[in-house]
């Protein structure tokens, strides 16, 4: 397949497509189509193959606002994402760390082994997505809207110039979103709509307790870095220990969990989320194993 050609970002602010997108953005403030209008502006500056928007919360699971996935069947992957894997996403971890409003290119924020991680294989490679850019609009410490922009593996890669162009027009987008939020209180209304959903509590419980009945606290620290795509060397740096010590911990984790690969580890973690019991703060792996023993 011939790679899709994307024009350069130099001089893009004179583009008629962008002028029209800005006009539509102004008209849609306070209306349901505002989120779509924001994506139109972003895509006029930085064309994509797939895009969308979701609200992310510190204490609740993400809420999808809009999909522009191609093919449409990829929406299934977005639904799976909101059941727990989002907690391992480098972009979500960046949000939890307090990053300000801005455009964030996965290539510049992901851990060193992320592109060989099972997370990347499952949610990017298998769906044909190359490096995405997220435009994060922060509302407060606990809430943000993320506009995700993706090109597929057959298209030209994003560049630093794309990120710079997005940052250049963000003040206009920010002003529109600020006014829209004042008029609609959109994220608060959506948070209320999913307040009864316990997914995030189960995800947090799994992060805090997964394999705690089998592993030492330090082995669990290493396990979480493994799930997020950190190499042994970078994990050692984060934990202020040696690369050799981390590799020993990794071997112990595989042995104790009776697995042989990161793919198995990732699958086991995801499968345990529905078995988490937030009120007990116990190891969901125990309940997952008990369930399998009962059905075998």
Image: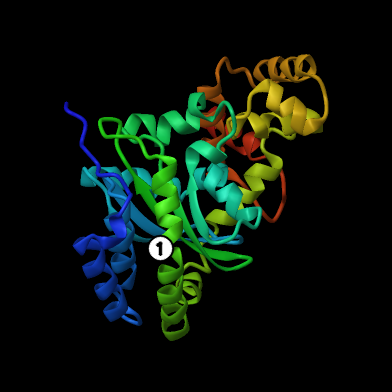
Q: Is residue 128 above or below residue 139?
A: above
Q: Is residue 125 left or right of residue 85?
A: left
Q: Is residue 106 above or below residue 181?
A: above
Q: Is residue 63 above or below residue 128?
A: below
Q: Is residue 8 left or right of residue 225?
A: left
Q: Residue at x 40, y 42 (%)?
A: 132
Residue 214 visible in the displayed image = no
The picture quadrant where one finds residue 228 is: top right
Percent x, y for residue 183?
42, 85
In terms of depth relative to the viewer, which is nearer, 87 or 203? 87
Percent x, y for residue 1?
16, 26
Can you identify the residue that label 1 sits on?
Answer: 169
Percent x, y for residue 275?
57, 44
Q: Dot 1 lies on which element?
A: helix
The picture quadrant where one finds residue 226 is: top right
Q: Residue at x 29, y 65 (%)?
A: 36
Q: Residues within 10 Å of mark 1 (few under 14, many from 20)?
A: some
């Amino acid at each position: 397949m011939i790679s899709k050609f994307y024009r350069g970002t130099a001089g893009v602010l004179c583009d008629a497509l962008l002028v029209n997108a800005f006009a539509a953005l102004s008209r849609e403030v306070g209306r349901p189509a505002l989120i779509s209008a924001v994506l139109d502006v972003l895509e006029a500056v930085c064309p994509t193959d797939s895009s969308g928007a979701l609200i992310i919360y510190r204490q609740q699971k993400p809420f999808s606002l809009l999909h522009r996935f191609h093919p449409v069947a990829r929406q299934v992957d977005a639904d799976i994402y909101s059941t727990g894997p989002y907690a391992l996403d480098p972009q979500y971890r960046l949000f939890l760390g307090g990053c300000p409003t801005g455009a964030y290119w996965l290539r510049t924020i992901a851990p060193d082994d992320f592109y060989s991680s099972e997370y990347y294989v499952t949610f990017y490679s298998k769906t044909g997505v190359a490096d995405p850019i997220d435009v994060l609009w922060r509302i407060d410490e606990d809430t943000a809207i993320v506009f995700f922009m993706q090109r597929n593996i057959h298209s030209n890669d994003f560049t630093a110039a794309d990120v710079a162009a997005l940052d250049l027009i963000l003040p206009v987008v920010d002003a529109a979103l600020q006014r829209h939020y004042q008029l609609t209180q959109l994220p608060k209304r959506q948070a209320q709509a999913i307040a009864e959903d316990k997914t995030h509590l189960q995800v947090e419980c799994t992060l805090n307790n997964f394999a705690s009945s089998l592993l030492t606290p330090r082995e669990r620290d290493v396990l979480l870095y493994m799930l997020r795509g950190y190499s042994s060397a970078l994990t050692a740096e984060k934990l202020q220990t040696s690369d050799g010590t981390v590799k020993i911990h990794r071997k112990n984790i595989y042995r104790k969990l009776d697995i042989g690969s990161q793919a198995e580890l990732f699958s086991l973690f995801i499968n345990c989320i529905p078995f988490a019991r937030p009120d007990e703060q116990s190891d969901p792996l125990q309940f997952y194993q008990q369930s399998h023993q009962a059905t075998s």
